[in-house]
Amino acid sequence: MMAQLLSLEGFQAAAVANGSEALQYLHNGHIKPDVILLDLMMPVMDGWEFRRKQQADPAFADVPVIVLSALDQSRAADVQAEAFLKKPLDFDRLLQLVRQYCR
């Protein structure tokens, strides 16, 4: 749903089901993203593990991350994200943040 919303707003957006798929997507030669919207609670590879691996990869470590989560912000502190949005999402705020990071 979020990818559709962003596409309707003129952004190129891709959605994946979990952190493992996200890493595969990044490494498959797709365009480097301007921003990553990261849910923490995902199957296979959660958001914390994805973020650790993303930060360890010089090719993608500098891509800003916006965390989207139903958890309290304190649970996401160690993710070191540029922003945190609590679910249910304020889509106007989400779009504002995405515009801030996208070229």
Image (spheres, grey):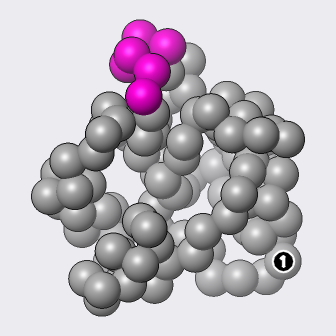
Q: Quick check: is 74 in the magenta stretch?
A: yes
Can residue 22 be seen here? The reply is: yes
Identify which residue, 52 or 89, lies in the foreground.
Answer: 89
Q: How far across and how far down the image is residue 34, in percent?
A: 46, 68
- Amino acid type for the residue under numbered disc 1: Asn
Q: Residue at x 54, y 42 (%)?
A: 39
Q: According to the image, label 1 marks what residue?
A: 28
Indicate the quadrant containing the C terminus: top left, top right, bottom left or bottom right.
bottom left
Q: Residue at x 63, y 82 (%)?
A: 31
Q: How far across and how far down the image is residue 36, in percent?
A: 51, 57
Q: Residue at x 30, y 62 (%)?
A: 98
Say left or right for 84 vs 46: left
Identify which residue, 24 or 54, lies in the foreground.
Answer: 24
Q: Specify the segment rendered in magenta.
A: 70-75
Instruction: Place residue 9 in its image quadrant.
Output: bottom left
Can residue 52 be seen here? The reply is: no
Q: How far across and how far down the image is residue 42, in percent?
A: 69, 40
Q: How far across and how far down the image is residue 57, in percent?
A: 77, 49
| Label 1 Cα neighbours within 10 Å, binned few <14 / some 14-19 / many ≥20 | few
Identify which residue, 81 or 16, lies in the foreground.
Answer: 16
Instruction: Place residue 69 in its image quadrant.
Output: top left
